[in-house]
Amino acid sequence: MTGDVLSYLRAVRVSLWGLVFQFFMAVALLVYAVYERGHSIAQTPEVSGKTFLADHAAATAGVFAVIGLPVWLTLALLFDLHRRERLEAIEAQRLAEDASASVFEESAADLRVAARRLEGFQKYALPVLSLSVAASLLIVGAVRFSQAGPLLSLANFTIPVFEGWAIAVGGGTAFAGFVFARFVSGMAKQRVWSALRAGASYAVGTALLGLLLAIAHFLDLIADQDALLRAAQLIVPGVMIALGAEFVLNFVLNLYRPRRPGEEDRPAFDSRLLGLLAAPDKIAENVGEALNYQFGVRVTETWFYRLVKVWWPAFVGAAVLVVWSMTAFVVIREDQRAIILANGRPVAENVGSGLHLKWPWPFGTVYIPESVVELRDADDRGGVTVERFRSKTATGVRTMNLGTNPPSPSAPAILWTNEHTDVEIFNIVQPTRLAELDPPDATEDDQGGADLAIVALEAPVLYSVRDVGAFDRFAVPEDRDELLKLMGQREVTQMLGSRSIDEILGGDRMAFAHRVRERLELAFGENGLDAGIEILSITTGVVHPPQKTATGFERVVQAVPIRDRRIEQARKDEIELLAGVAGSVAAARQIVDGLNEIEGLRALGRDEAEIRRAEVALQQLIQRSGGDAGRLLLEASSKRWEANMGARAKAERYRGELALYRASPELYMARSYLNSVHNAMRESRIVWYGRNVLRPRIDIDLETTDTSIGVFDPEAGAALNP
């Protein structure tokens, strides 16, 4: 690099001006980011520690601009050392031309202090500063990139409040940075100022980041599209990482690149990629040369190329006009309903799908209501992750859970005794009434066990948007679904609070869901708040008590079949007993009715004859039934008849004996005496002998007359062997 003192002095001044421009661009971006964060913290102090409250992309761009300050300062030092080296060279040349200074000729090289400083700065300080800038970009870019990852989801991203200031700061930074970079890149075409390309490229990088922020905020403010604004949180640190990697690669390539004598190395922080954007005329020249090489002719010298080169502003203007005219046409999808606005006033509401005409932008706009849906799921650490999704679907079917949360996809089998959702929501219901258990002494006001009960009820509601205008006026998109859910939960809570837990667990759920739907239609309909929605269906899914009480309910469920079995066994025993006693259950009931009738007659003091007739009729009924009672009565009657007839037989025999006695007393007495002796001596052995026998011989046969005694009879054996 060769040049005079004034050239280097001008380069020093330009580098210092670049330092000032870079400083103000950094301050503008950082002040906006800090002010945005401070306002967000003041609005929501309870979450002040979260990084998403600030404009993450603007803060990262501000840090990028701050890292560019050492670049301009390094260039200022480099050109100042060149200026000092040139002054020192001029003084040495003057000393060499002075004859009186010949005594200093041998030590002239030792007096070149500025030259040695310049050489040391280029050899050691410049690479170290380049690597420092590269390391700063890589570290800060990696940190901000990792912090921006979670912010892409709608649940963690919050649109900045001061979007107008963001557009102004981003646009101002882009304009000032690009204009100054074009000026510096024009100076860098001169060989003496070639090092200024590094500062110009870094200024262009800052300007591009500012332009990115301005466009992202402009799209979100005008078109309500925050995709680029959320993506900018990753793009800005990604640019920092890419530039840091390029600076490191430039440093490595400078070590192995061959050099011509007198050629100075380009600083490693001189970005080749951003240098093309700082000098776009070189891009056009490169494109023209590529076309000439590709077609083999001088395309840049043809009339068409010269025409395009002269009239390109008109072509661009015509293209912009055509694109602007196309904004008068809008296409509404099949699943959407829209409102067409002209200068902010609605001219057509509830517009259906198809192609529609409106005023061009910005005079005419189309508004499609948004819906924010939250999905909750359990993570591996036992917590709950919430994801928010924005959609502009109006005619699609939407879901609203008015009861407990639905089961998680990773939940096990849905049982009362296990957890199958992240956060269980319970509703208060009435406890079990004793009157429902049907005891004989219970009334409708009797309560059993507790004052209140709780139950978890899954009640998903499917609805669609009926009137887009009413749906949009109902509430803001962020609060609309939550307000609908709260109103629906109020109706469900009131319905559950008036019913007992037995009605909810074992009652008619279809009737309950139908009643809830009627209440929701009244609340959301035109006679209520007019939310502009239509209830499609409501179902009552899983219903269960708290997990801790599930085992008690299971015991009740298990006791029901046991109770039924015992009741059936008792009925069986009843039938067997009544059938055994009275022959049949119907006959037993008739007998009981007859007994009750006799007791009633006695209580009323009726005639004994009437009571006797009732008793006889009852006795005959019992005897005809064929049961044990009738059998016992018949046996008793038979024994009574036998006893009666036996007594009459004895009486008649006595009368005959008395008549015989009265007819002939002596004969009756003799006969009676002889009969008595006969009866007494009938089983005895009698020996007769005459009077003339003095010494009779008696042979006794000890054999019994009854020879049928069994030898195996213990009693007979004992009689034979006393």
Image (cartoon, helix red, strand yellow):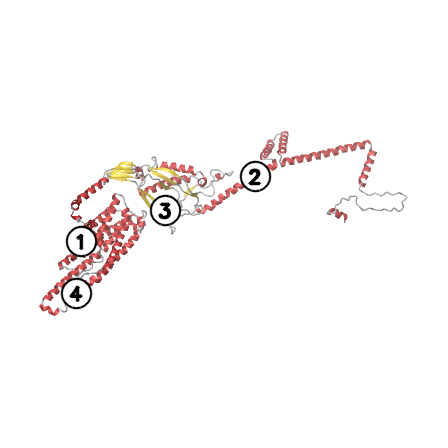
Is residue 686 positioned above or below 190 on the image?
Answer: above
Location of mark 4 (residue) = 113
Tell me how far mark 1 sits from mark 2, CA to CA: 109 Å
Q: Earlier in the sequence, mark 1 or mark 2?
A: 1
Location of mark 3 (residue) = 376
Label 4 close to label 3 by CB (< 8 Å) = no
Q: Earlier in the sequence, mark 1 or mark 3?
A: 1
- The nearer-to-camera label among 1 and 2 is 1
In this picture, residue 60 sits left or right of residue 401 = left
Q: Earlier in the sequence, mark 2 or mark 3?
A: 3
- The nearer-to-camera label among 1 and 4 is 1
Residue 129 in the image: state x and y as whole percent.
23, 59
Nearest to the observer: residue 303 or residue 143 = 303
Residue 572 — which label?
2
Q: Earlier in the sequence, mark 2 or mark 4?
A: 4
Question: Does the rendering let one see residue 234?
Answer: yes
